[in-house]
Amino acid sequence: MSAYPLIADHGLIGDLQTAALVATDGSIDWFCAPRFDSPSIFGALLDSEKGGRFRVRPTAPAFTGKQLYFPDTALLVTRFLTEAGVGEVTDFMPVTDEQETSRHRIVRMIRCVRGEMTFAFDIAPRFDYGREPHQVHLTDAGAVFEGSHTALTVRLILEPGEERLGAAHVDAHGDIHGEFTLRAGQMRGVVVETGAAGQLHPVPVGEAWRLFDETVDFWEAWLGQSTYAGRWREELNRSAITLKLMTYAPSGGLVAAPTAGLPEQIGGERNWDYRYTWIRDASFSVYALLGMGFTGEAAALGRWLRDRLDEQAGANGTGPLKIMYRVDGSSDLSEEVLAHWEGYRGSAPVRIGNGAADQLQLDIYGEAIDSIYFADAHGIAMGHEGWQRVCDLLNWVTDNWDQPEEGIWETRGGRQDFTYGRLMNWVALDRGIRLATLHGRPAPLERWRAERDAIYDQIMERGWSPTRKAFRQHYRTDVLDASLLRMSTVGFITPTDPMWISTLEAMDSELVTDSLVYRYDPEASPDGLRGSEGTFSLCTFDYVSSLARAGQLDKAREIFEKMLTYANHVGLYSEEIALTGEQIGNFPQAFTHLSLIDAAITLDRELDLHPPATARRESWVPPSRGDGARRVAGNGARPATADARA
């Protein structure tokens, strides 16, 4: 399986409607068009032989590949170091407007910056996950690949009459291969364009540089809106840009990841399609984006959520909301298996679509209403019709919260009374009550209060495990679950409550390994799937936030700084971290970057409130297990507010 680069050996480029992954060896291994959730054009990440790629690399037998982003942008530079010289490929996608389009461009500017370098290139598209054959037409100005429904145009970056520096040929599969040699200061390249087959003519060098400058200007201007000035500006800026790259501009929806089928265990079956917008992810995005000052993006996500409330697309007993949607807001996510693809490093099956779309996950209602409440506190208010939709949703929650469900982790092992689902239904009703009271809106407040308080009492009675002295995953088990790290964040319990401190200690002993956090133990709580998984990066950042709120600042900061070392070379995170430290799961993952932003903002705030000279100190005690010492907190933590984010 050496044909597969590490998942982390990629950078991300995009145009706010789709995105591509570029490996450190110069290969575009993943690209779907015209949308994130469209069939693939390049898919070698999931099948090195049959998936298709566009690779540019030195012909030298040995070279070193490095990557970086052009500062404060999404333009990716892949550098090649050889004995004969240094070359680089600058990849970017000119940003489209907010109108849906089939035309998307990838610009690949190839330069020799020192010495001399011969580059080899391979252009091998595989339309519709390799299921749509194509024909190719090659000329001196470029090439056109055409299938029955898909077309790809490749234009050379070249001045009219300029010297040809190489040659290309077409093989029996309709793929193009070639070589060209550049000396220091020379530049060539291509513009790859999807949509209807276009006229073949070279792209002048000046036009390529104009696209470069416009794309740089866009990203610098967008990032300039950030109000974050804390301790981890570089990391948060990169996370914000990554989240923007995963946003579908025509609708405002945020995909969970731009990839499908990357495994949670190498060789295992936990391989899902994340190219959709989850209600949960969209809701959490509002917190992170507003926390950094990106009000426009937060408002767009708020409109996306409002549209889903208006549609009431849920069916078959799953409630008024689906748990996920396509980027355009449609809800048909039928799951199928690409049996002809072997999967990343043999990790099959490769799934497209998502069979969890019709699950009942009660927590999404709390996350949706909490984000509306948070947005309202930041000046993004709803109108009368929006309030009516909120009331409809909360009345449904009032009638339906007390039932088994599949839960936040989308397990396929049957429904349970998950504590986290109950917690977030408490949040939904609590925030609805606060909004109605604050703005004088009509609402059945007595009914909402009665059900909110009933949920609270049930969690305290049935969600608490006297044996474990901790809140548990669901009412029929004593297994712990890292989703419950949000209990203090949402104000259900104060961060210094003895029950909460005891829960943190129990999680530390069972779910935490050094600085990394498992979401739960699948062996102790079967989830209907074979195999294991890595630590969940979202949960690690949530653990940091919980520790910071509990006043354990030294420990929180240490874990946060350690977690930053698991980012890849350009600051991106996948869903999980394997035992080896390798990034696994879909990449990059929005949830991880959202929780990184939230953890950093929380940690900044707590460190500012409790500077080192006055901060509560922590004392070391001998470790009770073989996974290192743990810390016991002293006094001085900030008490929780009703809304701990405010």
Image: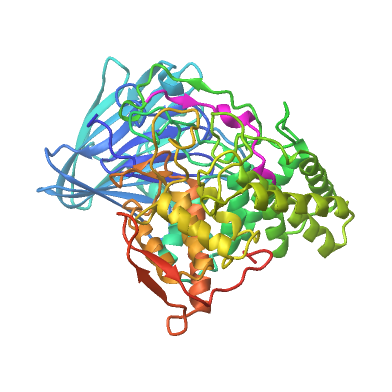
In the displayed structure, 136 sits above or below 328; it is above
**Residue at coordinates 34% horizontally, 56% vertically from top-left?**
514
Q: In which quarter of the image is the N terminus?
A: top left
Specify whether residue 440 is painted magenta: no
Q: Which one is in front, 505 or 643?
A: 505
Q: Which residue lies furthest to the left in this view?
A: 83
In the displayed structure, 172 sits above or below 16; it is above
Q: How many marks?
A: 0
Specify whether residue 360 is painted magenta: yes
**Residue at coordinates 61% horizontally, 65% vertically from top-left?**
494
Q: In which quarter of the image is the C terminus?
A: bottom right
Q: Which residue lies furthest to the bottom in this view?
A: 613
Answer with left or right where residue 263 lies relative to residue 637.
left
Q: Which one is in front, 163 or 479?
A: 479
Q: What stretch is highlighted in magenta?
A: 348-365
Q: Is residue 217 visible?
A: no
Question: Where residue 95 sits: x, y (%)?
Answer: 51, 47
In the displayed structure, 319 sits above or below 170; it is below
**Residue at coordinates 31% horizontally, 59% vertically from top-left?**
628
Answer with left or right where residue 474 lies relative to residue 154.
right
Question: Where residue 51 sits: x, y (%)?
Answer: 36, 25
Question: Where residue 610 sits: x, y (%)?
Answer: 50, 79
Q: Which one is in front, 420 or 347?
A: 420
Q: Is residue 552 visible?
A: yes
Question: Where residue 563 sits: x, y (%)?
Answer: 37, 57
Q: Residue furthest front?
A: 467
In the displayed structure, 404 sits above or below 339; it is below
Q: Which one is in front, 622 or 63?
A: 622
